[in-house]
Every structure is written in structure tokens, then in C-alpha cells.
Image (spheres, coloured by chain):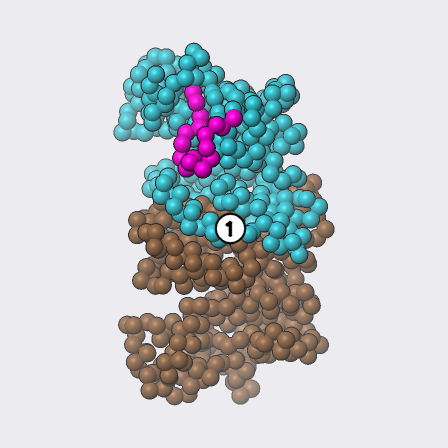
Chain colours: A cyan, B brown
Amino acid sequence: VKEFQIINQIFKDLAKNSDNKKSNLNLLIDAKNLCDDTAEIRFKKNQIMAISKDIFVEDIHFRLTDDVEKIAAKLLTTNLSDLASTGATPICYLFGFGKSEKCNEKFLKSFARGLKKIQDQYNISLIGGDTVKSKNIFFSITIFGVKNSANILDRSNGQENDLIFVSGNIGDAFLGLNLSDKKKNFKKKLANLLSKKEINFLEKKHFEPTARVELGNNLAKLKLANAAIDVSDGLIADLNHICISSNLEAEIDLEKIPLSLEAKKILKNSNYFKISDLISAGDDYELVFTAAEKNQKKISQLAKKLNIKITNIGKMKKNFADKKTDKNQKNHVSIFQNNKKITLSKFGYEH
Amino acid sequence: VKEFQIINQIFKDLAKNSDNKKSNLNLLIDAKNLCDDTAEIRFKKNQIMAISKDIFVEDIHFRLTDDVEKIAAKLLTTNLSDLASTGATPICYLFGFGKSEKCNEKFLKSFARGLKKIQDQYNISLIGGDTVKSKNIFFSITIFGVKNSANILDRSNGQENDLIFVSGNIGDAFLGLNLSDKKKNFKKKLANLLSKKEINFLEKKHFEPTARVELGNNLAKLKLANAAIDVSDGLIADLNHICISSNLEAEIDLEKIPLSLEAKKILKNSNYFKISDLISAGDDYELVFTAAEKNQKKISQLAKKLNIKITNIGKMKKNFADKKTDKNQKNHVSIFQNNKKITLSKFGYEH
């Protein structure tokens, strides 16, 4: 992480003065200081294009032994999830492809099938890209969405006393990843505890996540939320991004973290995983968002309408720390259990 | 090339029905059937965003021994050149980065310096991107531009009897590449013929090309040209792209191909290169465009105003071939020398 902060620092200079630069074209560019997953371009009549880019590399983000169709589907879904957190409506995407000798026609057809499945689901289409030769395979997607208000749901837009909400359940993708790891053998270890259906359910959460596009869209349109982010790095880490950008602290209740029945079963009946693992792990692709307390009822109604579980897990608080000494590395998320503040170490927590 | 046609075929299905799909958002998406380097999105009030993506891979498009600053500058320039051929005004770009262990901070700073140099020159800025770990280094740039008319300068827009024009000179980049190749030793071989300054001039044409953004912009704004493309694959190959997309043939005069004094000197006084090499090689990043004969005078005036050499090298003709039997692979560019048609083999030509 520190290493990538250095990279960001080096390239930040290239994004300077992007605002207003093209005012002669009636455009407004917002690079969000390269701190966001999404940049925005505002066109005439206030229509705004939201843009996001994600890259998957062989042996880093996927293995060749993985199901190619699912790799493709997940890559496109993670991009859609970035857009979802901005409230934008996805419209189309570009596809970049570093092709090694290992990619035969069958591989490509499976990959295209995976993209097709997701693009049909979200009503988007491919508009172009570039294919190059490469020793290692990599895929890059740039996705485009449109929204009508600027900066809405921005991670810097969290307000003091906002309630913190999260969609769906947290940790299922992490459990699914571990169950699918043949070396770790959890599938065997938990065979007495979980049915095949339950194992499949968790694995699917890892390999075939859902992007909360409709939820993000509605939160923006109805102006119900202030700040939002998708959970890719982990609930705590991503909520911490909102804290840093909004210069606020977050307090969450461990008991309120929404868990699936399957996750609860595992936590209760085995010692392999703790809830702290689940909130530290990533790849949930749920939305965490902050909203004024007065909107709580409307958010419940929206949850019912979209048939999505939405849970209030805590509250945003004033940040009393000196901003200058805060090097953007501190954890701004406090976790409470039975009204006592607990400390979370990387995997596992201490009282 | 054939291999990449297969890839294109597989992914073409994903671009289907992209037109008009988002009419509820007042948007029109044009993927150009994935056959173009640039896709377009039309916003309200007819403002159109042009988008292009290019990827550079280690050991394929550059070597680690190359000057990093120049790699960066060239990558951004090639993207700008794609936009130039559409007549769009560049506004900003995204940067994707596959980072290997060989990329230290010095490497990154040089890379950022190279981008900075070009973005200042063309008044654009970075708006975001993604950095991932990778065994091999790769860079991906997605560039955005804005234009006011759709499909103008499209490679499919060439008209029968259009004159064919090319900007600048052809072949200098190819000669510069060869001169810089230490193994081939041309620098020594041509030392009696070329001054150091002349060698530098040619090498610079390869390592530091210019994107003809202003020319493309003016051709579109003044509606002087019908079809345009930038010379990246080679003059003949790129003109052939216009022929295929416009369903036309092209006839060019070998004597009219614009060459630099340096290139002329080499062709005249050595046997290492032939003019057929120069028009088959790529990386010139000049614009080839077709225009109605009545616009010839205005094009000359524009050339003078922008201080860019523009040369009429031939004419577009009707394609008498049966479109169905034409597998998009045939060469549609005929070359004439002393009014006789000649046949061009890959490197060298036969009467």
C-alpha cells in the first residue's frame, strides 16, 4: 500500500489544474486528486460522465486454472461496482487485452462469454479497446457511466453524525475464497458443518459477485446518501477511505455487521475464522454509504423496494485529530462490541 | 494480423446493438463495429466524446534499456495521434500501469516526466487510472477528446474521386529506428553520408513523434476532409484501412510521396533502404486523409497557416470488386511510378 502511495504521489502532479481547464469547451474535468476509483467529466447541461479503470493480471488477480468465463465476468463486475458507488448509470466499456501464447481461441471465447453475461445483465456494451502481445496475460477495462449531479455520493462528502449503512452481507466472498482454496482444505474441514449448497453459495459470492448498480443509482437519484464506496479492500479499509476523504471518524458496532446464515454458522461452530477476518477482507462489492439520520426511513423503503438488505452499522463522528499530522495512514474506524471499544489487529482483534 | 482479426471477431458480438441503446439517457454510442481506433459517445446538444486506448508492453513495444521518459512521451503521443485523426480536441486521459519489481522510484519519476512534457504540450491532464503488480511492465492509456460533429473524418467516409493527402514526411521514423539499432550498425555505415545532426533528426522522428492534433482539429472544424487516419501501421496499410472501410480503391504516385531531405539522401546514395520500405513501415504518426478536389486550395491555405507540409499523393477510385468475396485482407492501394502500375512486395517492389 505504501508503495502505491508513492506512485500516486509521483503521478498526482499530472492531474493538477485539470479542473476548469477546458472551460472553452464547456467541460469540467474532475480527477478527484487521483484519490478516487472514479473520475468525472461534466458536459453541457450538467450531464456528467463517470469513468473508472481496473486491471487484472495473471498470477496476481487470477490464475490460468480459474474458470476464464468467471474471471471475465468478475473483472467487468468490479468495474461496475466502482461506478455503482458513484450512483452513475453504466453505459459502455473499453477492453484492453495483453495476449500471451497461452490464450487460444477457446480461452478467448470463454472470456467473451463471461463479459457478455454481465453486459447483458447491466445493459452495457463494448465500444473498443486494444489487443497487444504480452508474456503474461492481463486484462484492462475502462468503464463509462452517466449521472446528472456532480460529486454526489463522493467519498469526500460524508457528514458529521451521518449514519453508516452497508448493503447485503459482509465476509461471504472471503469465506468462499477460502473454501475454494484446495491447499487450505477448509471444504473438508467444514464438511460436517456446511451442506454442498451452502458451500456453493459462499464460493459464488467470491467468484460471481454482484455490483450494486441499482442501489447506487437510487441513492444518488433520490439524494438519500452523502458518501459511498464499494467494499473491495474490506469493510473497515473502505470505510476508512470515506473517513480520510471526508475528514471524519467512524464508529461501528461489531454486533450490527450483517452476516449471512452461512457465515454465522461458520463463526459460531468453528475456530478457523473470526468476524474480524470478515470485516478486514475484501471483494464483497457491497456498498458502504453514509446518510443523514432523517433519511433512514426512506432508505428502509428503498431496501424493501429493491429487495436488498441494508443495515445501519454505525455513525460518522467529528475528527479531532490535527489534519496536518495525519498522514492518511491512520485507521479512523473505531469498532465497538458490547459498548466497549475494541482494537482490531490485522487478522483477529484484541480487547 | 490474422490472429488479431480472430480476436476482433470473437469480441465484435459484445459491441452489437450499442447504437441508440441508451436513448433514454440522451446518449448515442458508436463503437464503429470495433474496426476503428476510436469510439464515440454523443451527449446532449450533439457534443461528442471521442475515446481511444493504447497499450505498450515491455519487450514488445519498448525495452527497459530505452529512455523511460521517451517511452512515456511516445505512448501518450500515439494516443493523441489516434484522436487527431478523428478531429477531436484532446481533454484528458487515464493511465493504467502494470508495475514489475524493476520499476523503482527513479523509473516512475522519469515516466511521469515524459507524460508531463506531452500533456503540457497538448493541454491535457491525467484524471485517474489503476496500478497493479505484474511480472512484466505494461502501460495502458485511455484518452478522451471532444468534437462537435459525429463521424466526421471517419475512415469509412472516403468518397469516390477524393484526393489523397498526407501531412509531413513519410519514412523518417523507420529510418530513425534503424539508425538507432546498434546491431544493424547503420549509423556507422551511413556515417559518411549523414551528419550527426541529420542522424539525430531521424532518430527523433522515431522516438519523439508529433501528433497532428491541430491539423485534425482544423480539417474537422472547417469540414475540409472526408476520411482520415494516422499512419501507425504504415502509409499503405493505413490508407488501405480507409479503402476497406469506405469500400473504395486508392491510387497513389510513388514520386509524390513526401520525403525529408535526409531520407532522400539515404535512398539516393545507399542501397540499404528503398522507398517501398518507407511506405510499408509505420510509426510516422502523420495524417493521411481524403478530401474533395474543390477543397484543395483551402487545404493548401491551412497547411501554410499551420506551417505543416501537406502533399497530394493520389486519388480514391471506385471499388469494382465484389464486396462479398472481399475478405478485408486484399490490398486496395495501387502504386504508380512513371504512370506505370507497380507491385509492392513486403520489403521491396517489382515491376
Q: Is residue A340 above or below residue B340?
A: above
Amino acid type, residue under disc 1 in the picture: Ala
* Residue to which mark 1 is pinned: A15
Location of residue A343 in the rendering, given as x and y in whole percent from the top left corner = 37, 21
Residue range (magenta): A318-335
Q: Main secondary structure of the magenta part?
A: loop
Location of residue A204 in the rendering, given as x and y in whole percent from the top left corner = 43, 28
Q: Residue at x 42, y 76 (%)?
A: B202
Q: Nearer the viewer, residue B127 or A96?
A: B127
Q: Quadrant location of residue A282?
A: top left
Location of residue A139 in the rendering, given as x and y in whole percent from the top left corner = 43, 46
Q: Residue at x 69, y 40 (%)?
A: B24
Asked whether residue B34 is in view, the answer is no
Q: Residue at x 59, y 52 (%)?
A: B31
Quarter of the C terminus of chain A within the rendering: top left
Asked whether residue B337 is in view, the answer is yes
In the image, residue A140 lies in the stretch drawn in magenta: no
Please state the chain letter of the residue tagged with numbered disc 1 in the rendered image: A
